[in-house]
């Protein structure tokens, strides 16, 4: 018996006895400065050694047991001590600890090809930092039960983290690992405070890679270029942007009150809507203009504004609907007017600008015009639907319960905070409310929610 054969017997015995074989890195918990060498470890791994002619038949049978690691091939060439060329198929030791762990039907099929337990052995595999995915590394390094993978998003080449305070001391390690492991990443930033400024951008710290905030992202078949340090962009809103775009038909009109760099406005203009896009942030405005050009938008369909949302509603929107209601402007093919208000922390506070926006003199007979508002808000509490409805009604100053079309949960921001969208029909009652209320009553009706 050769030394290798004896080693194999011992390895088989040992592996049979051990309850579970973990492939995770060991001895790195608590590491704050990345030391790639410390991830080196030897693991005993089951392999099936077959002659080259048997490989094509054997591989499909044993594929479910393959050892899957980063930068690792589960099927490798091997030359025996007697100089014979063989193939080694590496199995996952977390699944296969001995020959009988292979399903019986698979063992029987293998036997038909003359492959059996005599082909099954164990080899020692040297695992390095390069073999582990970032989530495995974080699981091994960070305090137990920490989950950071869900708290990051990728915007072009930037990975954006929102680390909780107790993980701050690990931030440079986390940044470096992400930079190493995610091929499309060149910059890792951590948001260093919550978004509480007017322009909804965050102060951030570069924790790994280059200080380059200029990104290009693709959404709803449009390209957006932006400076992530100066403007708002959230890849988690892509689906919501798409949902709104689905509501828009060619010739419809969109007033995008807080448009950012244009994720509603630019694709809407591309779909032949008439779009009025506004944002207060001069940088958003700059990138909005840039993106309109780079997406080759017909600028007769897209008008851009850099004003406060309230002024935008009280001038641009007001003038447009005045012309509709006094018959100066006619919408083609019963087109609708849509108003998007995506500034969840504050948008409801702009709703009262619609209340009594128009005077009754502007109203020519019974012109009909569907105006749909999509206003976003945050809801913290047991019943986010009720909370967001109440917010809207309270702020618009009119009981619009009957006009609410939908209350939609867009996404969970944190365990107790939901981002909601309230869709409602902006009625003539609200737009002309002052004049509709008799006897100089204040325009705000008593709310019943
Ligand atoms: C949450 S972002 C939404 C951007 C974009 N609509 C989207 O869906 O990604 C809100 C935007 O509102 C803009 N903003 C903040 N206060 C504003 C105001 N008073 N008037 C107009 N825009 C404002 C910010 O600059 C920011 O771009």
Image: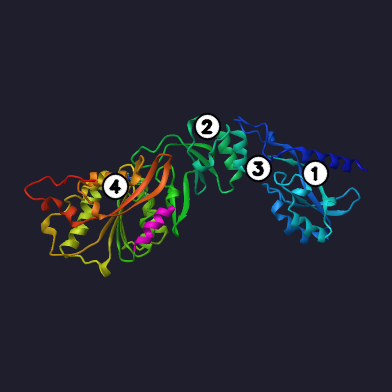
Where residue 316 sits, quadrant-wise, is: bottom left
Spot occupied by residue 147 in the image (x, y as percentages of width and height): 54, 38
- Cα–Cα span, label 3 and label 2: 21 Å
Look at the image and tell me whether residue 343 can be seen.
Answer: no
Q: Which residues are magenta?
A: 238-248
Residue 78 picture location, percent across and down = 82, 51
| Residue at mark 4: C-beta within 8 A of ligand 1 | no
Residues at marks 4 and 1, CA–CA distance in whole angstroms: 64 Å
Look at the picture and state if 143 lies above or below 410.
above
Q: Of tags 3 and 1, which is closer to the observer? A: 1
Q: Which residue is mark 1?
A: 123
> What scheme was used to colour the molecule?
rainbow
On the image, numbered disc 3 is attached to which residue?
132
Q: Residue at x 36, y 51 (%)?
A: 408
- Residue at numbered disc 4: 389
Cβ–Cβ under 8 Å for marks 3 and 1: no
Q: Is residue 418 left or right of residue 122?
A: left
Q: Answer yes or no: do the residues labelled 3 and 2 have beta carbons within 8 Å?
A: no
Dot 3 crowding, Cα within 10 Å, few <14, some 14–19, many 20+: many
**Which residue is more in the foreground, 199 or 70?**
70
Q: Badges 3 and 4: C-beta atoms under 8 Å apart?
A: no
Query: Is 6 placed above or below 241 here?
Result: above
Secondary structure beneath label 3? loop
Q: Answer whether residue 367 is magenta in the image.
A: no
At 30% across and 66% down in the image, what residue appears?
251
Disc 4 crowd, CA 10 A, few/some/many (<14, 14-19, 20+) = many
Task: Determine which residue is flagged by label 2.
Answer: 167
């Amino acid at each position: 018996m050769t030394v290798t054969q004896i080693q194999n017997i011992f390895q088989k015995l040992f592996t049979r006895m051990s309850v579970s074989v973990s492939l995770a890195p060991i001895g790195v918990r608590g590491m704050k400065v990345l030391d790639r060498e410390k991830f080196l470890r030897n693991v005993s791994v089951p392999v099936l050694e077959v002659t080259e002619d048997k490989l094509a038949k054997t591989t499909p049978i044993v594929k479910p047991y393959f050892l899957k690691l980063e930068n690792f091939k589960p099927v490798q060439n091997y030359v025996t001590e007697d100089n014979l060329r063989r193939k080694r198929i590496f199995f996952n030791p977390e699944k296969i600890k001995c020959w009988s762990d292979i399903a019986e039907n698979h063992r029987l099929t293998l036997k038909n090809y003359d492959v059996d337990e005599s082909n099954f052995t164990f080899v020692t595999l040297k695992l390095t930092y390069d073999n582990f995915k970032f989530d495995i590394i974080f699981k091994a390094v960070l305090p137990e039960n920490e989950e950071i993978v869900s708290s990051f998003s990728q915007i072009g080449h930037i990975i954006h983290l929102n680390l909780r305070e107790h993980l701050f001391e690990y931030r440079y390690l986390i940044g470096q690992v992400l930079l190493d492991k995610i091929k499309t990443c060149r910059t890792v930033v951590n948001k260093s405070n919550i978004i509480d400024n007017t322009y909804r951008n965050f102060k951030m710290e570069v924790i790994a890679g280059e200080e380059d905030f200029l990104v290009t992202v693709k959404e709803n078949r449009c390209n957006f270029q932006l400076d992530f340090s100066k403007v708002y962009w959230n890849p988690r809103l892509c689906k919501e942007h798409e949902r709104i775009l689905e509501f828009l038909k060619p010739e419809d009109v969109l007033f995008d009150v807080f448009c950012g760099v244009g994720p509603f406005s630019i694709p809407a203009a591309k779909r032949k809507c008439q779009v009025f896009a506004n944002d207060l942030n001069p940088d958003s405005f700059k990138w909005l203009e840039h993106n309109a050009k780079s997406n080759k938008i017909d600028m007769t369909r897209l008008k851009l504004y850099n004003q406060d949302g309230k002024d935008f509603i009280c001038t641009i929107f007001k003038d447009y609907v005045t012309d509709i209601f006094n018959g100066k402007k006619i919408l083609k093919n019963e087109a609708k007017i849509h108003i998007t208000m995506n500034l969840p922390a504050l948008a409801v506070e702009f709703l009262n600008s619609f209340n009594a926006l128009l005077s009754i003199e502007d109203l020519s007979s019974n012109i009909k015009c569907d105006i749909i508002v999509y206003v976003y808000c945050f809801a913290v509490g047991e019943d986010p639907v009720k909370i967001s409805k109440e917010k809207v009604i309270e702020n618009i100053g009119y009981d619009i319960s009957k006009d609410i079309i939908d209350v939609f949960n867009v996404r969970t921001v944190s365990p107790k905070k939901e981002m909601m969208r309230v869709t409602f029909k902006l009625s003539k009652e609200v737009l002309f409310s002052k004049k509709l209320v008799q006897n100089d009553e204040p325009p705000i009706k008593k709310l019943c929610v």
